[in-house]
Image (cartoon, rainbow, N blue to C red):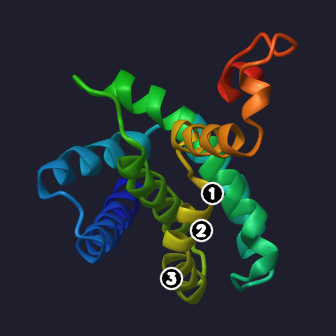
Amino acid sequence: MNTDTAMRALSVTLDAVKAMMIFDNYDESKKATVLTAINIATNAADYVNMLKEQVKKIKADGKFDSNDLPYVFSIIINSRAYLVSTVKNGMNVTSTIKLDSTKYIVFGVLHFVMVTENVDPQVIQQTIDFYPALWDLIAIDPKDFLIKADSFWRKAFPCCFVCACCPKTTLEDRMK
């Protein structure tokens, strides 16, 4: 891919990410950091290649539908850990990348790959339309989930957290 094509794809991608941020009323003070992280992540060859493999599967039938959900799930799940380390190593950041920021970074790189791989614009638009909902379904912060689950288990089975036969006292300890 030549530099001009990559720059054009990055420009279109950043515009799409900005539009999503505006729609979500994303914190204005965090936008520049997210856009910088997208720029860095689009240069991470291993990560981009992983996304290209998933995008090839998505575009195989020429449409975005329920058959493509496993590929998007895979992208989101595999992206979080990879991006946190890649972006942290590529930027001078003083805080960790939060889950809400990761949503836009993953979307940005996915969009960039779809544009550079000449995916049908209708498939790209369908992905843009479905991505926020898919993200909300999959990208649950495990700590929030454990706190809610722990509260549920404590209410449903209080004896299991105090009896001698159960040496571990929290659901998080039980899952280790």
Q: Report how far apart the C-alphas of labels 1 and 2 lie in the structure.
A: 6 Å
Q: Residue furthest bottom?
A: 122
Q: CA distance from mark 3 to mark 2?
A: 10 Å
Image spot of residue 134 (x, y percent): 59, 68
Residue hosting label 2: 134
In front here: 57 or 8? 57
Q: Residue at x 28, y 77 (%)?
A: 23
In the structure shown, which secondary structural element does the residue marked by tag 1 occupy?
Answer: helix
Residue that mark 3 sits on: 129
- The residue pinned by badge 1 equals 138
- Proximity of marks 1 and 3: CB atoms separated by less than 8 Å: no
| Residue placed furthest toward the right | 165
Q: Amino acid at mark 1?
A: Ile
From the top left corner, tell me how far across and down residue 165 is, in percent. Answer: 87, 13
| First along the sequence among labels 3 and 2 | 3
Task: Give the left or right position of residue 110, taking residue 52 as reference.
Answer: left
- Circle 3 — which element? helix
Q: Comparing marks 3 and 2, which lies closer to the viewer? A: 2
Badge 3: residue crowd in 10 Å (few <14, some 14–19, many ≥20): few
